[in-house]
Image (cartoon, helix red, strand yellow):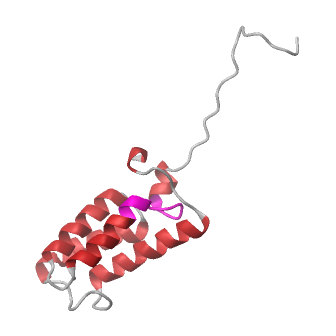
Amino acid sequence: MQFLHATFPDRLAGTGALMLRLLLASMLLWPWGLRAAWPAADLLGWAWLAALLLASGSLSPLGAGVSLVVGSLDPGLDGWPFAGLVISLSMVGPGAYSVDALLFGRRVLRRPASRGGTNPKE
């Protein structure tokens, strides 16, 4: 999963990614902003799935893909602005304040001490 995101930004950029994820999740479900009407009944389950994945930051590429499909099929969303926001979120990544960052985030790699190598203290 980590190969899908270059970094998991924290501080101000991570807060911005969190706000963008919450905005997109709310746009999928409630009629305000770029949404003109309630989601269609046949897309409501997919919209909820995409909103949950986006809001939690869990499996972000899958959530972005599902939300792009819902956004393209739902006439209540104005397609291009919504798609632009989803693509920009995909480019930024889920951010440090997400489930993806907890599961697949930054790791500290420690190299084991070499055996039989030259030790300058000896």
In the image, taking residue 85 as reference, residue 43 lies left or right, namely: left
State the residue at coordinates (61%, 66%): 11
Residue at screen point 25% across, 62% down: 65
Q: Is residue 34 above or below residue 86?
A: below
Q: Is residue 23 left or right of residue 74?
A: right
Residue 82 part of the magenta-drawn span: no
Q: Which region is colored magenta?
A: 89-99
The residue located at (45%, 56%) in the rendering is 100
**In which quadrant of the rendered view does residue 31 lie?**
bottom left
Residue 23 in which image quadrant: bottom left
Residue at far right of view? 122
Which quarter of the figure is the C terminus placed in?
Answer: top right
Looking at the rendering, which quadrant does residue 46 occupy?
Answer: bottom left
**Residue 94 within the magenta-colored segment of the rendering:** yes
- Name, please, the residue furthest toward the top: 116
Give the number of callouts: 0
Q: Seen in the image, is 99 located left or right of residue 53?
A: right
Q: Is residue 15 above or below residue 106?
A: below
Q: Position of residue 43 (x, y in %)?
A: 15, 76
Between 121 and 41, the residue placed more toward the observer is 121
**How far across and how far down the image is residue 14, in percent?**
54, 66
In this view, 27 is above or below 86? below
Relative image position of residue 1 (x, y in whole percent): 39, 47
The residue shown at (31%, 91%) is 32
| Residue 21 image position (x, y, % from top left) | 41, 72
